[in-house]
Amino acid sequence: MRVSIFITCICDIFTSNVGKNTVELLENLGCKVDFPLNQTCCGQPAYNSGYLKESKKAMKQMIRAFRESEYVVSPSGSCVAMLGQYSKVFADDPNMREEADNLFSKSYEITQFLVDVLGVVDVGSTFKGKVTYHPSCHMTRVLGVQDQPLTLLKNIKGLELVDLPLKEDCCGFGGTFAVNNSIISSEMVKEKSRHIFETGAKYVVGGDMACLMNIGGRLSREMKDIEILHITEVLNCR
């Protein structure tokens, strides 16, 4: 099975270890992994800010980059969900719409791919500690990935998973929302931080690094001894 990694901007620039863990997870399960060097941003920041013309350029480049891929896997539910918006954007261009549909049909968030495509619910990892899971908005509400991360976490030896109160609430990041509505965003992440602290967990795990960075920044400013971890960092722990 040939898998192309869609790394995303955040992981590429800030958290390259997430990409490393994603590759190792897939290779350990027998996948042949490649990395198309001509991939770029999925176009979400520009698209959400109303710059449709500019975002289309990024979308077309992504379609070209992964045109020959068998599967496309990413450590971000939000960015994979964005690929699903391409068809709507190119609704008046039958050829581009078909290519957009093809890209999204073979694209998966990493836990979605492990559980739904490979049929793996236990990757054989070991992690000792109390963990709570933050389900990011786009990953759960747009992409529809809800149970897969929890299934994998529950099968990690030594890991104690505790439920996060009001877990469905947004952390306040929301891409450009955190910039354009910083005061509201700050209050939202403050509330998320309080709920995480209430669990008594030492680690908060998620599937989108942007959300985790936002949460981690708040926890750090409040001097709370809680570490943020992308789910691949836990799944690839031996």
Image (tube, rainbow, N blue to C red):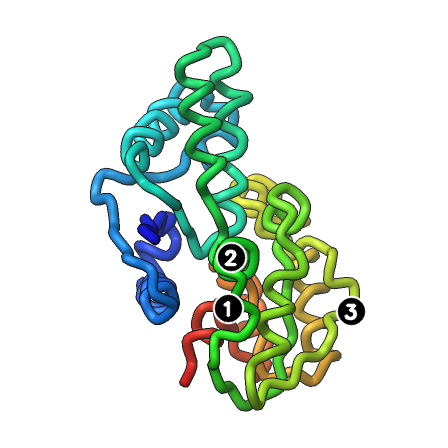
Q: Position of residue 110 (x, y in %)?
A: 47, 57
Q: Is residue 196 above or below residue 45?
A: below
- Label 2 – label 3 distance at C-alpha: 19 Å
In which image quadrant can residue 57 be found? top left
Q: Position of residue 205 (x, y in %)?
A: 56, 70
Q: Is residue 225 left or right of residue 14?
A: right
Three-letter amino acid code at the position of disc 2: Asp
Q: Is residue 156 left or right of residue 137?
A: left
Q: Is residue 17 left or right of residue 172?
A: left
Residue at the spot x=78%, y=69% of the render? 165
Three-letter amino acid code at the position of disc 1: Ile
Q: Residues within 10 Å of mark 1 (few under 14, many from 20)?
A: many
Residue at the spot x=51%, y=54% of the render? 117
| Mark 1 or 3, nearer chain start | 3
Question: Do the CB atoms of the residues marked 1 and 2 lie less than 8 Å apart?
Answer: no
Looking at the rendered image, the quarter that the C terminus falls into is: bottom left
Between 59 and 171, the residue placed more toward the observer is 59
Which label was assigned to residue 165? 3
Residue under pointer 2:
208
In which image quadrant can residue 20 be found? bottom left
Residue under pointer 1:
231
| Mark 2 or 3, nearer chain start | 3
Three-letter amino acid code at the position of disc 3: Pro
